[in-house]
Image (cartoon, grey):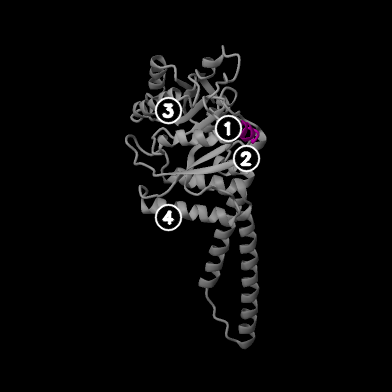
Amino acid sequence: MIKTGQTPRLTVVVPCYNEEPMLPTSARVLRDLMQQLMMRRQITVDSKILFVDDGSRDQTWALIEQLQHHDAVFTGLKFSRNYGQEAALMAGMQAAQQFSDLIITIDADLQDDPQLIPQMIEQARSGIDIVYGVRNDRSTDTWFKRSTAQGFYWIMRKLSVNLVPNHSDFRLMSRRAVSALMQYHEAKPFIRGIIPQLGFPTTKLFYKRQPRQAGTSKYPLRKMIHFALDGLLSFSTAPIRAVLYAGIGICGTTFIMLLWIMIQHMRGAVVTGWSSIMLSVWFLGGFQLVAISIIGEYVGRIFTETKHRPRFIIQMDTYSAAFTQTTSLTTPIRFENQSTR
């Protein structure tokens, strides 16, 4: 929470993966916005934009280095390899929490509206710890993506998982909220599900998502499915319970069929044939494979967690170096004509 009259230091965390075509545009837009916020004294002059290079195979990191040489507002983290967007977000927030009062995460494609950032900061100054950027429509999505997203939120809501519908990773968090988030040590944290559990004051700001201006989406169908499974398996044991109920149902149906066969046998109306037998064998075999796979997913996650391997490895860090000479977190500045709360 920001103290009354204090100018917060802001870090904007931008995960990047093969964003060479889009990065120059994103950097220019965010830099201009940061300069405006500094001139209006909404943030300190040493606030930063932190690009997290998630093992890009193109010239993304080279562009980040060029940006750093031209303007001190730009900084970067470079992973040793690709670890995924969730890891990039966690790394950026982890690095920023010790130096920043406010942390905003936003995708590099800027489909989320960066012009919402000043309103987010004002909400934070009023005592809000978490400000969600929420889409007010999904007109830019295909029918398939829109339908699957709505289905995902519906399923998670039925499973009592507290998600913010139509919210991606565009949000503001206070330093204490990020510190609380860092206490979650899952190897593969589902950030969108964890943050609503933190319990700090929250609010939503709505915006219209824009089409991507350059590059390609980093979330093809395969990654979308993996993301949905991560959310489901991280917060619910419902799939295992569903297997249990299905198994009970199949056993009940089998018992009924057994009674029917015995009655038919006593009546002398038994029809010989292999089709019904083969159908039963294939059905039960398929069900067993599905059941084993679901249980295996949970066991695999337990195995991953028990190894305690690092979520990511940072190869280069120019963000922390920018604050090594800083002796205090922020320099308080009193706003003129600001009433005390």
Amino acid of disc 1: Ser
Crowd tier of the residue under label 3, counting other residues whose Cα lies within 10 Å: few below 14, some 14–19, many 20 or above: some
Q: Amino acid at mark 2?
A: Phe
Q: Residue furthest right?
A: 306
For residue 131, above or below residue 264: above
Which one is earlier in the sequence, the residue at label 4 or at label 1?
Answer: 4
Q: Nearer the viewer, mark 4 or mark 2?
A: 2
Q: Position of residue 112 (x, y in %)?
A: 41, 39
Q: Secondary structure at mark 1?
A: strand
Residue situated in front as seen by the camera: 339 or 294: 339
- Look at mark 4 in the image and give the residue it sits on: 147
| Residue under numbered circle 2 | 200
Expressed as whole percent of the image width and height from the top left, the position of residue 300 reads 61, 42
Q: Residues within 10 Å of mark 4 (few under 14, many from 20)?
A: few
Q: Which of labels 3 and 2 is toward the front?
A: 2
User: Toward which corner of the image does residue 289 lie, by quadrant?
Assistant: bottom right
Magenta residues span 176-184
The answer to whether marks 1 and 2 mark residues whose Cβ atoms lie closer than 8 Å is yes
| Quadrant location, the C terminus | top right
Q: Is residue 232 above or below residue 317?
A: below
Q: Give the mark nearest the N terminus, 1 or 2.
A: 1
Looking at marks 3 and 2 on the same chain, the residue that comes earlier in the sequence is marked by: 3
Q: Does the magenta segment cover residue 183? A: yes
| Helix, strand or loop under label 4 | helix
Q: Residue 186: within the magenta?
A: no
> Above or below — where is 193 with respect to 7?
below
Between marks 4 and 1, how big is the CA–CA gap? 33 Å
Circle 1 is placed at which residue position?
174
CB under 8 Å between callouts 3 and 4? no
Q: Amino acid at mark 4?
A: Ser
Q: Quadrant of the N terminus?
A: top right
